[in-house]
Image (spheres, grey):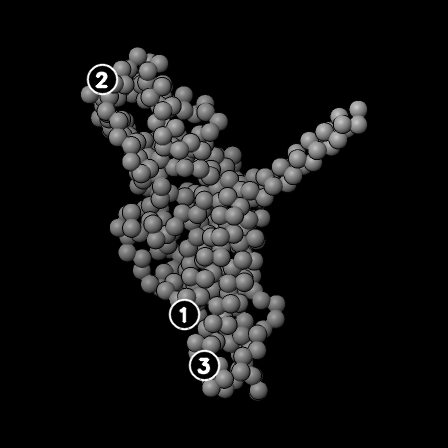
Amino acid sequence: MKYFKLFLFILILLNVTSCSTSAHEVNSRVIVVGEDNDLIAIPKEDEIYKRVIAQIQESLLRHKIFVVDEDMISVKLGFEMPKGRDKSKILQMLQVANNTTDATVKSRLLILFSIIPNIQNMEFTRQLSVRIRGQIFDLSNLRALSSFEVKNNESVPVPKKESLCNELCVQEKAGELAASLGRELGEVLIIKLEKLIEGKVSSNISNETVKNSGLGNVYNLKFILFKKSQILRLKKKLETFESINEVKLQKSNQTENIYSVNTQLNIGQLEEEILLYLLDIGIDIDKDIRVKSFGNNINIEIL
C-alpha cells in the first residue's frame, strides 16, 4: 500500500508537470518583421535591430512557435526587401507570399515592431532610453489583433563628453538595452499569442485560426494526372491523422493539384503514409506512379 501511494504521487506529479509545460507552448506559425519607415526607428540593417529580432525569435522558438524568416521569403520568392519599409508595404509583401503555392513561406500571424531609441541631453550627462512597440496582425484578413509596447524602466546615464563615450559607445549601450527588451517582449508575445490562438481575446478568433496556424513541418504536395476522386479521398484520409494539422488546396487545374500539408511527420513518414493509401485503392506504386521527394516537396505523378 505504501509503494502504491508513492507510485500514485509520482504519477500525479508528472501529470502536473506535463500540463504546466504544455500551458506555455503555443501552437503557431508567425513571421516577425521590423517596421523602419519612421525616421526615429532603428533601421533593419542596424546591429541593434539584429540583436532585438534574434532575442524575439529565440524566445518564440523556445516556446515551440515556428518563426518564418523574412530573409528566407526574400530568397525563395525573389523579393527585394525595401529600406524604410512601412506597414502597408510589409503587409502587401506578406500577402503575396501567402498567395504562392509554396507552403513553407506562409504564415497566418505577423508580429510587426519598431525600435525607438531616445537620448536626452542633461546638464551634466545624457540619459538613454529605448522602447519597442508594435502590433500582431492576422494576415488572412489584415486585421490588427493586438498591440504591445515594452520600455526600460530607468534611463541609462551616458557620459556627455564624446571622448568618454563616442557614437559607437552609445550604440553599444542602446543595443544592450534593446536586446534585454527583446527578451522581455518575447515573453509578452508568448502570452498574447497564447490568448489569440486559444480564442481568449475580444477579437473572437475562430477555431479555424488555431488549425491554420499550427506548428509543424510544412510540405508542398503535388499530384500530377490523378483523378479528382482519388485526390479528394486521399485528402480526407490525411485529415484523419492526429499528426496532420492541416491539408489545404493551393492550386488546381486539369492535370495538377497542389496541396500544403502541415504535419508533425517528417517527409519520409508522410510519403510512406501516402504510398500505403495508394496501395489500398489499387494503385501499383512500383509501376503506375513516379515519386520525387526533395526539400519540402513531394511530387507524385501517374504514368
Q: Which residue is mark 2?
A: 287
Nearest to the eye among marks 3 and 1: give it: 3
- In percent of width and height, residue 272 lies at 36, 24
Query: Where residue 69 sits in the image (x, y, percent)?
Result: 39, 50
Where residue 106 appears, as percent x and y from the top left, is 37, 43
Give the alpha-carbon distance from disc 2 to disc 3, as whole Å. Answer: 72 Å
Closest to the observer, 38 or 43: 43
- Quarter location, residue 34: bottom left
Query: What residue is at 47 percent from the left and 34 percent from the top?
Result: 211
Q: Earlier in the sequence, mark 2 or mark 3?
A: 3
Q: Residue at x 55, y 42 (%)?
A: 25
Is 138 in front, or is 203? Answer: 138
Q: Amino acid at mark 1?
A: Leu
Q: Amino acid at mark 3?
A: Asn
| Residue shown at the point (31%, 52%) measured from the top left | 74
**In the displayed image of the protein, which residue is found farthest to the left?**
303
Gap in Å between the C-alphas at discs 3 and 1?
Answer: 21 Å
Vertical placement of residue 153 versus 261, above or below? below
Relative side of 16 to 283, left or right: right
Under tag 3, what secondary structure? loop
Question: Reading the chain from its start, which is encountered first: label 3 or label 1?
Answer: 1
Q: Nearer the viewer, residue 109 or 47?
A: 47
Q: Are marks 3 and 1 in contact (CB under 8 Å)?
A: no
The residue that mark 3 highlights is: 166
Residue on which disc 1 sits? 39
Write the residue at 75% across / 26% down. 4
